[in-house]
Image (cartoon, grey):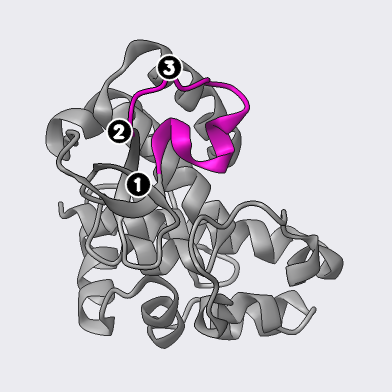
Amino acid sequence: MKSQDIGLLLKLISLEHQENSSSQDRGIFTWPHDWRDWESHSDDIGQPLLFPTVSSEFRDFAYTTRNLEAETGISKTQISESLRRCIDIGLAKKDRQFGVPRANKKALFEFIISGIKYVFPAKLGEVTRGIGTSFAAPILQNDILSSGELIPVWPDARGTNKGQAVEPLFKSATLAIKKDPDMYAMLALIDSIRLGNARETNIAKDKLKSFLE
């Protein structure tokens, strides 16, 4: 397994959320106004926001390797290989009705809470400019108060915060989160688990479970 496999599975979960939502819920104006932590750019808006309202048309485009590459920054070749690996080990499967790949959310959650900090650990590094993650991301800001120390950030030239560097779970994660608030939330929650602070981990697990149910 590679760390980008987890990133791809999270994107499949986000797409399934969008697929099952109403057409109104797919519009950019329904997104929280404060979930961005970087200087905005027109390329940040992901293609799923512009999809047709009909679920079949959404699926026809959303799950193509071309779109998954655009949304995650993972190459089409690597996406195909990641899907094969995930299906082989039971973390993904093909939807019997629609034929699109689906994450095995229960198995993925079990792996994240039990194994991800050992397989893909994270640690705080040098001070840098970046995008807030873990308790510094919007998903956790109202639940965990900083004690004044430097916040954890993903290094990014367009980030608006200064803090201690945390290597993202996969190389193109900062591209993926700029296109999708669910990806930002899930990856930030996973970083809380990867970093290993007990209180943050417990809160992150509860919130992550709601994404994966």
Based on the picture, tell me whether residue 148 belongs to the magenta stretch: yes
Tag on residue 147? 3
Tag on residue 162? 1
Local secondary structure at mark 2: helix
Local secondary structure at mark 1: strand
* Disc 2 to disc 3, C-alpha distance: 30 Å
Res 9 → quadrant: bottom left
Nearest to viewer (mark 2 / mark 3):
3
Magenta-colored span: 133-150
Tag on residue 192? none
The reply to whether residue 156 is in sight is yes
Contact, mark 2 vs mark 3 (Cβ under 8 Å): no
Q: Residue at x 56, y 53 (%)?
A: 182
Q: Residues within 10 Å of mark 3 (few under 14, many from 20)?
A: few
Kind of residue sitting beneath label 3: Ser
Res 114 → quadrant: top left
Q: Is residue 46 above or below residue 208?
A: below
Main secondary structure type of the part rendered in magenta: loop
* Disc 2 to disc 1, C-alpha distance: 31 Å
Based on the picture, tell me whether residue 149 belongs to the magenta stretch: yes
